[in-house]
Image (cartoon, grey):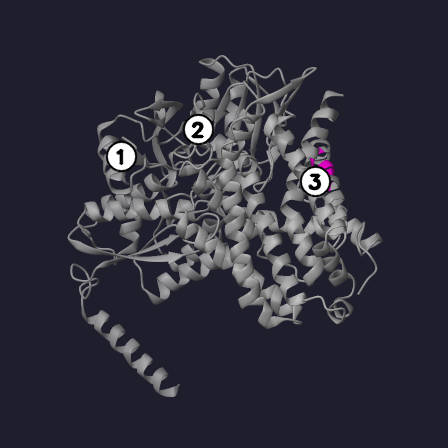
Amino acid sequence: MHFYVMQGLNGLALGALLFILSAGFSLIFGLMRVANLSHGAYFMLGAYVGLTCIDRGYGFWAGVLAGGATVALLGGLVERLILRRLAGRPLQQVLVTLGIAFIIADACIWLWTGDPRPVPVPSGFEGVFRFQGFVFPKYRLFVVAVACALGLALWLLMERTRLGAMIRAGVDDMDMARAMGIRTSVLFTVVFCLGAALAGAGGVLAGPILSVYPGLDSDMLPLALVVVILGGVGSLGGAFLGSFIIGFIYSYGQALLPDLAYVILFLPMVLVLTLRPRGLMGRRTV
Amino acid sequence: MLHRGKALSAALLSTVFLSTLLPPGFASAQSDPIKVGFMTVRSGALSAGGRQMEEGLKLCVDQYGGKMAGRAIEVITADTAGQPAVTKTKAQELVERNGVDVLIGPLAAFEALAIDDYIRQAKIPTISPSAAAEDMTQRKPNPWFVRAVGTSAQPYHPFGEYAAKELGYKKIAVIADDFAFGHEIASGFQRTFEENGGKVVQKLWSPLNTPDYGSYISQIEPDVDAVFAAFAGGNGIKFLQQYNNYGMTTPVLGAMTTVDEGVLKSMGDEAVGVISAGWYSAANSNPGNKEFTEAVRKQYGADPGYYTVGAYMACQFLNNALEKVGGNVEDRDALMKALRSVSIDSGPYGKVSIDDLGQPVMDVTIRKVEKKDGRLQNVVVKTYPATSQFWTYDQKEFLAQPVYSRDYQPAKK
């Protein structure tokens, strides 16, 4: 009993982490049909920027903001200056994002040496939460809350705001949206900035659990891909569901079937791709 | 194309001709610099270790004023990116294009294994500053290879005994990186720990890129006396922080690399109290090491760890051998023989010699992380002098058993 509850909590925390990682990826993928392979690098860059902020004494929360803002700015520039020129050529766009990922990764080694660094748990969230013999880190519970709040906020944004309506229109039928007078060019930039900001801020938020090190980018990117493919391309709800499913499968799976530790994250993806290629909540469009 | 071919063969002919006329080594010895091919990692996930290796090597070469045995030392550095295929290409480039006389490197064991055949075939003396895979100096020794660091398990034979006898631990859970280095460390520890009455009751192998150790930490048996955590690179940081976050109070024993000085400087109070074993500690107070750590701190502002000292000692080995052969690197057999019989009395390692398979016999220390002079240090609590890779076992019997692996002795409940 204790085992199942504890691993359930671990799964919840990992799922939350995965959603924070992949929300921005899903957003960009959904609208722009670009698998942004720099997403992992954005995540890492955000974490490094946040860490620098914390080192300078501005505190954790300023670090989250700075990480998000820096990466949003970078994302906006990349979209305007590079991806824009390759509009309508998704393959080239994907390759460019991969190249950018390499550049960011090497720049991070150059700027922040390459020493692995821990990110401190923000004050107020240190220590553990004890209940009936169960012990669980407070910060992880907080991350679960953040993931839920983020999910809710994104849902409200998509369903209840004008921007959200425009994005949804773009996801469903780009040409029709353009014909209706939606300035898709601006929309693309906004969405790319937002997706990048989520990656950057997510990197800082995940820092106290994952720490920051060269290679964090390439460790995280496949996880974001798995979540989005499992959940369904372009579906934020799917990404949310996918994150937690993978969190639970990983946490129970690697404990019960330790020999499968390497494939356990990818098995559900393979299964879903075979049985339901558009993902759990992907819609039949395009 | 034809022209170049002709010119090349003419050049080749003339060298062949010259070298038959002159006594061996005459043309270059004592005048040309000795070329050292240095394989390190400047890009990718292993680059922190690569940078520390470069620092260690540079410090050593500088201390000799860029000259060994009367000849200038020219270091040619190659970035292997930590990828075996690249390592092989770079090794060939260094030997065949740059014409290096000796190789120092590479960083990771899987890189070293990738060039194992090439080293034999090219007959190029190679000094390993870091790669610790057991069999390279055990069941598959390479006559052109000498190691300047311990084998993966070398420090953990004494450590297992120490944990059982002196710490009095009876039941231990092991968690280790799931690759050869982790398997070998864990097995060496388990062997002597169990021979001295302890029991490893649980073994957890976590993939190298485990995002979250939470689900492993939750599995640790609640009644163990200690957790032996064997991690490399940044995983020690991640594990110890998460272990602390989960409110765990069971004592942690570490591998040398779990709390290596290279990562210890980034750690917080969660590392305090971790006891580990290794063939080096920056806090070791022997005079040779004091001099070394002061130089490193002055030059690079941090304590030296695994990679810094490994490359520094590889360079010291080279110097020691060059002195013996009077700088004559052209006679590779003699140079290799000298490298295989390196003997240094004082330095970061203290006293060190080489066994007949090319592996250092060196002091192993038990270290405990303490905060001293405002920084975390691996304070030495006990020294096992002149420890062989075979510990107290008979070499023949040791080698008759299979190499330590994931399947060595399962955990017993």
Q: Nearer the viewer, residue B270 or A161?
A: A161
Give the side of residue A86 with respect to residue B165, left or right. right
Q: Position of residue B244 (x, y in %)?
A: 53, 25
Which residue, as the protein is rendered here, is positioned at the far bottom?
A: B2
In the rendered structure, which segment of residues is drawn in magenta?
A246-251
Q: Is residue A250 magenta?
A: yes
In the visual, does B411 lie left or right of B107? Answer: right
Mark 2 or mark 1: whose residue is earlier in sequence: 2
Task: Place residue A139 in its image quadrant.
Answer: top right
Note whether B213 is above or below B196 in the view shown.
below
- Residue at mark 3 shares a chain with residue at mark 1: no
A58 up-or-down from B321: above or below: above
A186 and B122: which one is in front?
Answer: A186
Q: Position of residue B77 (x, y in %)?
A: 34, 57
Q: Distance between the Cα atoms at labels 2 and 1?
A: 22 Å
Question: Which quadrant holds the N terminus of chain B?
Answer: bottom left
Chain for disc number 1: B
